[in-house]
Image (spheres, helix red, strand yellow):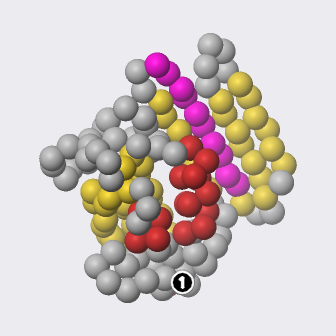
């Protein structure tokens, strides 16, 4: 992989990487009152479960949002990893969440040419709020 990274002062980190025809990027903004981490890639996998687990293990967020979006053809090539109410193509949601996280939102949206999986989770020890809604304050990896 080719990597280009930068540390911002007084705080922050940005990394962009190339791996074959794909990219991956990490942005970290640690602050006293809240922190934000994002990870994005267009690297094609049949299953994103292991990758999601590695990112979560690395940063250990109290809450996170995971999205997986692709055209209909690419989404149909994903592994059908689990069955049951949380089953989604290409990601074993129960495997990601079972140890430390509870599912707040688990949505599969089908557009004309694209599908979008949206998963929002928080630690089991403390639910983020009593409501199940999308809030701006529930960004990927934000620690409260």
* Residue 54 x, y percent position in the rendering: 61, 57
Is residue 107 positioned above or below 129 on the image?
A: below
Residue 116 visible somewhere in the drawing: no
Chief secondary structure of the magenta portion: strand
* Residue 44 x, y percent position in the rendering: 65, 70
As for residue 128 lying within the magenta part, the answer is no
Q: Which residue is mark 1?
A: 79
Magenta range: 23-32
Quarter of the rendering containing residue 77: bottom right
Give the SS element for disc 1: loop
* Residue 128 x, y percent position in the rendering: 26, 43
> Which residue is rendered at x = 48% and y = 85% of the image?
80
Quarter that holds the C terminus? top left
Residue farthest to the top? Answer: 10
Along the line of sight, the residue nearer the viewer: 51 or 20: 51
Is residue 92 positioned above or below 104 on the image?
A: below
Q: Is residue 85 toward the left or the right of residue 51 in the image?
A: left
Is residue 32 positioned above or below 81 on the image?
A: above
As for residue 29 lying within the magenta part, the answer is yes
Is residue 140 positioned above or below 72 on the image?
A: above
Along the line of sight, the residue nearer the viewer: 97 or 110: 97
Residue 96 visible somewhere in the drawing: yes
Quarter that holds the N terminus? bottom right
> Which residue is rendered at x = 44% and y = 62% of the image?
99
> Which residue is rendered at x = 42% and y = 56% of the image?
100
Residue farthest to the right? Answer: 2
């Amino acid at each position: 992989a080719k990597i280009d990274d930068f540390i911002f002062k007084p705080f922050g980190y940005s990394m962009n990487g190339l791996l074959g025809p794909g990219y991956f990027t990490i942005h970290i903004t640690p602050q006293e009152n809240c922190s934000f981490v994002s990870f994005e890639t267009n690297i094609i996998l049949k299953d994103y479960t292991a990758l999601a687990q590695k990112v979560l293990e690395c940063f250990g967020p109290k809450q996170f949002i995971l999205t997986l979006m692709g055209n209909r053809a690419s989404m149909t090539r994903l592994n059908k990893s689990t069955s049951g109410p949380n089953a989604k193509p290409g990601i074993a949601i129960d495997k990601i969440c079972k140890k430390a996280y509870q599912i707040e939102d688990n949505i599969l949206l089908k557009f004309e040419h694209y599908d979008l999986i949206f998963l929002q989770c928080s630690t089991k020890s403390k639910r983020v709020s009593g409501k199940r809604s999308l809030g701006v304050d529930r960004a990927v990896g934000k620690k409260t």
